[in-house]
Image (cartoon, rainbow, N blue to C red):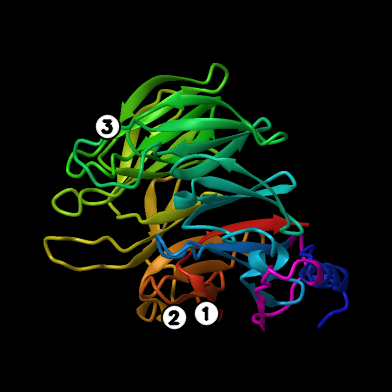
Amino acid sequence: MSKRRLSHICFSASWLLLLLTVAGCRHEVVIYNSETEQQGTAQYDAVAGFYLLCEGNMGSNKATLDYYDFLNATYHRNIYSEINPYVAKELGDVGNDLRIYGSRMYAVINCSNKIEVLDARTCIRIGQIDVPNCRYLCFSGGYGYVTSYAGPVSLNDHYEQIGYVARFDTATLQIIDRCLVGFQPDGIAVAEGKLYVANSGGYMVPNYENTLSVIDLATFTEQYRIPVAINLNRVCADSHGQLWVSSRGDYYGHPSRLYCVDTATDVVIDSVETSVSDFWLDGDSLYLYSEPWSYLGETFAASYCIVDVRTHRVVKSNFITDGTDRIIKKPYGVSVHPLTKQIYVTDAKDYVTPGTLYCFSRQGTLLWSVRTGDIPAHVAFLWR
């Protein structure tokens, strides 16, 4: 192992000594060791590594955090519990989103009703922000914004609890305001001084929501809603004044689709006939994977494509070019290295056992793979 410190992650001898000291003073503390595995080829550039948040099964309290160190080409599993042995119930129940903003990392832990706040370089816990049934994050101007279903996890076509967006101060970790939106808000993005929120109505089958809420950042009030499609999910803004929004459809006659909104006029200007489970925007390339369920055919049909956000066209029908897609059982996440353009795809397999992370070259050929925690999903790259 290299004598250099592991890309800002605190696995140094001094930190291990601290853990042993804590364990010696508090006999009730149980330290869960992380696992380390060599994978890939060492590389040094401006990106130190990436974190991978594994969701874990709902109700099992098994959300975990992994880390890949580019300098040493090492994959570290389940680092949170070892670095923070004093935290009861460890990371919590269902990891739903992961973001780095400034020097801190924020992990949305959905069913534990909180955002875990960590030092981005050491992974040491700083605190938490309590938000019921929280979903997705974005940041702007020193503030964080998180969507909340507000009510409990419950399928009910007459669900009465409307959702909201909570605004918190990233310096104090205090929630300072709330803005009501639609039912079961999911994806959220900032563009042109506005917050865009995807209202899903996902608990209200078959009465799904079909709008984007538009919130003015200056006043933090909802201005209006844009009709898009039913059961909206993810949202991201590109560099061309456009917003990309995914619809999960209704799993029957209304298929999943990708939609484009002009942020100057807040009008839907186009749609792309491809299903979307999740996406990752890298420059002008929107990497999508999907595995939409159809109750009509009782089938899944996985796909991996790239959409050019300038032309609104699918420019590559399958970004995995070596046949590895045939062994991926349940694709659950996609991300792209901002410099090398290596592509990462996660596989949740059967949702109850450890998953797999696949690393592909920018040409789509497999470079390496590694075992992860249960239901690997959300990646955040750490810059040096």
Query: Mark 3 or 2, which is nearer the eye?
Result: 3
Report helix, strand or loop for mark 3: loop
Asked if the magenta segment contains residue 36, the reply would be yes
Q: How far is disc 3 from disc 1 in space, using C-alphas?
A: 47 Å
Q: Amino acid at mark 2?
A: Asp
Circle 3 residues within 10 Å: few <14, some 14–19, many ≥20: few
Circles 1 and 2: CB distance less than 8 Å? Answer: yes
Residue drawn 59% across and 41% down?
129
Report helix, strand or loop for mark 1: strand
Q: How far is disc 1 from disc 2 in space, using C-alphas?
A: 7 Å
Determine if residue 23 is in view. Answer: yes
Residue beneath label 1, please? 366
Residue beneath label 2, please? 322
Residue beneath label 3, please? 160
**Residue 292 coordinates in the image, percent (x, y):** 27, 60
Residue drawn 43% across and 65% down?
60
Observer-nearest residue: 89 or 356?
Answer: 89
Q: How far is disc 3 from disc 2 in space, using C-alphas?
A: 48 Å
Q: Amino acid at mark 3?
A: Glu
Nearer-N-terminus badge (3/2): 3
Q: Is residue 367 left or right of residue 297?
A: right
Specify start and end residues of the magenta stretch as a single range.
24-47
Q: Amino acid at mark 1?
A: Leu
Observer-nearest residue: 62 or 96?
Answer: 62
Residue 271, placed above or below residue 66 = above
